[in-house]
Amino acid sequence: MFGFIVTFLGLSGLILVHELGHFSVAKLFGMHVEEFGIGFPPRLFSFRYRETRYSVNSLPLGGFVRLHGELDDAGERSFVRYGFFPRALVLLAGVFMNFVAGWLIFSSVFWIGFPAAVFVTDVMPGSPAAIAGIERGDMIADFDDPAAFSDFVGSSGSPAVSFSVVRSGTAIPVTAMLRPDPPPGEGSLGLVLSGGATEPLSFFSGILRGFHAAVSLSWAVVMGLGSLFVHPESVVGPVGIFSIAIGTGRLGLVPILELLGVISLNLAVLNLLPIPALDGGRLLFMAYEAIRRRKFGPRAEMRAHAIGFSFLMALIIFVTLKDVVRLLS
């Protein structure tokens, strides 16, 4: 359960960091922040410092920021009274903080270093690897780089390939059939691998490599958004994330940090999507107001955000059910 606990706490921290970005920039511009909450209600306790209430709530998943007059003019220092530039910076601050968090997480991975090994981070359902009994968190024996293992599989020249995986310190021989025409992105075995030796880097080298990794992975998320509509089965929800975390937890702290870094960058990119209820959706409404030079009615915007939120909740429920069926299959 080490991976589950660390990932749960890390995910909560990433959401809280996102909200802290909104909070900090709103304060910087002098906006009235009504409440900054850790977790979600019901409220456990709170205190007021100057004009803002700070609360600790009973549902420990991230946090929230409540700005005065977010959708309609509620008086002096209301959010909507500010110009496009400061409001856009407040919304983008959460995305920026998630990118920075991902950057620092990957930098810490390069500072710590990683031993030469190949790990299974995911197994496609119904794939030859799944049929052979390979599980998330297994280590591929006798290989120190994912590319070397892929070359071994590709050059086998037979309909089946044999190798060993290490699970809980025990070597387990496996034989898996190779698919001649696998689904796109799955490979002949249906494995998702990670690993390869990484020597500990100096502070500045780690920062630079972490930044490069964060930019590359963010771009990969952007490029992968289109494939979600072509291959929706590849999407995982909360259950899938924590299932991966449990398997990753067997490998130690560094793979969990890598997982959290990927999650943070996904949060950054997905929050920019122009869907109502997300930061990107709110930016879209603000851009409409700036171009048309007239306000979008607060009731209409509130209705649009409610629809967007309902859509996101329905999507999460659908993906969660899919993850549960996948785990039980």
Image (spheres, grey):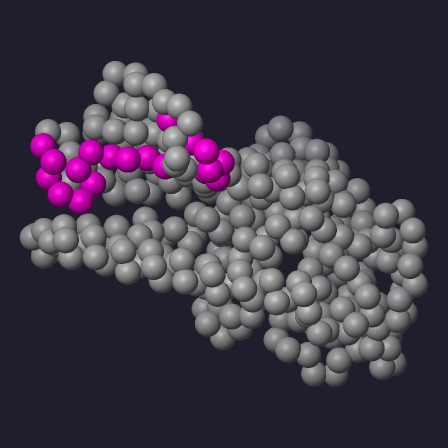
Q: Residue at x 82, y 66 (%)?
A: 133
Which range is magenta?
55-75
Q: Can you give x and y, in whole percent of width and height, for residue 139 in the image?
A: 82, 53
Q: Nearer the viewer, residue 85 or 12?
A: 12
Q: Can you give x and y, in whole percent of width and height, for residue 267 in the image?
A: 46, 49
Q: Nearer the viewer, residue 160 or 214?
A: 160
Query: Main structural element of the magenta stretch: helix, strand or loop?
Result: strand
203 within the magenta span = no
Question: Which quarter of the image is occupied by the C terminus?
Answer: bottom right
Q: Residue at x 88, y 71 (%)?
A: 175
Residue 322 occupies quadrant: bottom right
Q: Is residue 255 above or below residue 46?
A: below
Q: Could you tell whether 204 is left or right of 306 in the image?
A: right
Q: Nearer the viewer, residue 111 or 302?
A: 302
Residue 288 occupies quadrant: bottom left
Q: Can you give x and y, in whole percent of width and height, for residue 325 in the image?
A: 61, 67
Q: Could you tell whether 305 is left or right of 82 in the image?
A: right
Q: Residue at x 56, y 70 (%)?
A: 233
